[in-house]
Image (cartoon, helix red, strand yellow):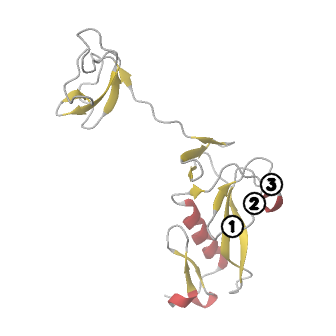
Amino acid sequence: MPDSASVVLGPKLGEVVYADIGANFPNSLRAFLRAFDALVQASVLSVTLATPPGSPANGDAYVVAASPTGAWAGQANSIAVWSTQIATADTNTKVPAWEFHAPAAGWRVFNVADGKYYSYSGTAWAPLAAAALMTYTVAGLPASPGEGAIAFATNGRKVGEGAGSGTGVPVYFSNASWRTYSGDAAVTS
């Protein structure tokens, strides 16, 4: 293992992304380690920039927006990551530069700017839709879905609603029955 003075840890995962040449780390391995640090649990600072920011910090990542310019030209939809740990020609000289990772369909990132997850369809990035609850009538709720299952009972009664006048209620499955969140009682229609 190289001594700590010749090792650099990645900004996101805190794992090795650079080690001096004497430690037998070729540039291709260094590039892999940087990509691993950037893409595992991927997060980006923005999905709307088409021009690189002026003073990025090591590890800053962005989804490149349409019609990119400057150093990002030709990289629309790629994940651009600023790295200060790129070595040249298998030497220990480090130069800062953008590295680009072209996404495949299904890649996901968390966008720090708006707090949303985005998914790549194969042609574009789009925010992931919030998950919707499965919807049933009280009589149609699954008999044994498993502890902790959640759903929406369209004719379930809220506290104070009379029999046959349920306007709908979210429910969860616990202790072998569907229960309302509002009162922890078995759901009825």
Q: Which of marks 3 and 2 is in front?
A: 2
Q: Distance between the residues labelled 3 and 2?
A: 13 Å
Q: In which quarter of the image is the C terminus?
A: top left
Name the spot of residue 66 as percent of width and height, x first: 76, 46
- 56 to 30, vertically: above or below: above
* Residue 96 numbered mark, or none: none
Amino acid bearing label 3? Gly
Considering every residue shown, the one lying at the far left of the view is 175
Amino acid bearing label 2? Pro
Question: Which residue is tagged 3?
Answer: 74
Identify the residue at horizontal 67%, vertical 75% (top origin): 84
Identify the residue at horizontal 58%, vertical 47% (top origin): 114
Name the spot of residue 1 as percent of width and height, x first: 48, 87
Q: Which image quarter: residue 116? A: top right
Question: Which residue is tagged 2?
Answer: 52
Circles 2, 1 touching at the beta carbon (< 8 Å): yes
- 45 to 160, vertically: above or below: below
Q: Is mark 3 on a helix, strand or loop?
A: loop
Name the spot of residue 117 as percent of width and height, x first: 54, 46
Q: Nearer the viewer, mark 3 or mark 1?
A: 1
Question: Which residue is tagged 1?
Answer: 56
Q: What element carries label 2?
A: loop
How busy is the neighbourhood of tag 3: few (under 14 within 10 Å), some, or many (20 plus)?
Answer: few
- 27 to 169, vertically: above or below: below
In the rendered picture of this protein, how many numbered marks are placed on residues?
A: 3
Of pointers 3 and 1, the one earlier in the residue sequence? 1
